[in-house]
Amino acid sequence: MTNKYGLPEEELKKIRARDTKCVYCHKAMINPSSGCSKCNWATIEHLNHLSPWDNPDTVAYCCGSCNSSRGKKKLPDWFKTPYCVQKNINEKTVAKPVKKYIRKIEGPL
């Protein structure tokens, strides 16, 4: 079974197990069904800003705040925003899956 992004549910389960904290700001995230603030929800993050969306190497989980802040910005551009500067989010502080994506896809920033 796949979701609206075309990712098999098994792949999403692996990603969920790996990304227990936001891959950007590292805060603990909660399941959206818990009724708490959306800023703390675990949300699917597409590291690539353009499709295809079905590549597990380009998907991570981040908090609703970071996902909302980033929007459709490319990672290098987003890292320069006041949101990231204030929270010390950059290519050196993000979680391993994001660093791996940057090395493999984005190249040196």
Image (cartoon, grey):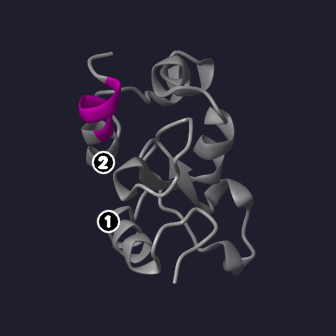
Q: Nearer the viewer, residue 68 or 46?
A: 46
Tell me the residue that label 2 is attached to.
97
Tell me: 87 left or right of 18: right
Tell me: 14 left or right of 39: left
Q: Amino acid at mark 2?
A: Pro
Tell me the residue that label 1 is attached to.
18
Mark toward the start of the polypeptide (2 vs 1): 1
* Mark 2: few/some/many CA within 10 Å (<14, 14-19, 20+): some
Q: Position of residue 47 (x, y in %)?
A: 46, 41
Is 105 covered by the magenta stretch? yes
Question: Count of labels shown?
Answer: 2
Q: Amino acid at mark 1?
A: Arg
Q: Nearer the viewer, residue 22 or 101?
A: 101
Q: Is residue 26 above or below residue 80?
A: below
Disc 2/disc 1 C-alpha distance (Å): 9 Å
Q: Position of residue 49 (x, y in %)?
A: 55, 35
Q: Is residue 80 above or below residue 71?
A: above
The residues colored magenta run: 101-106
Q: Secondary structure at mark 1?
A: helix
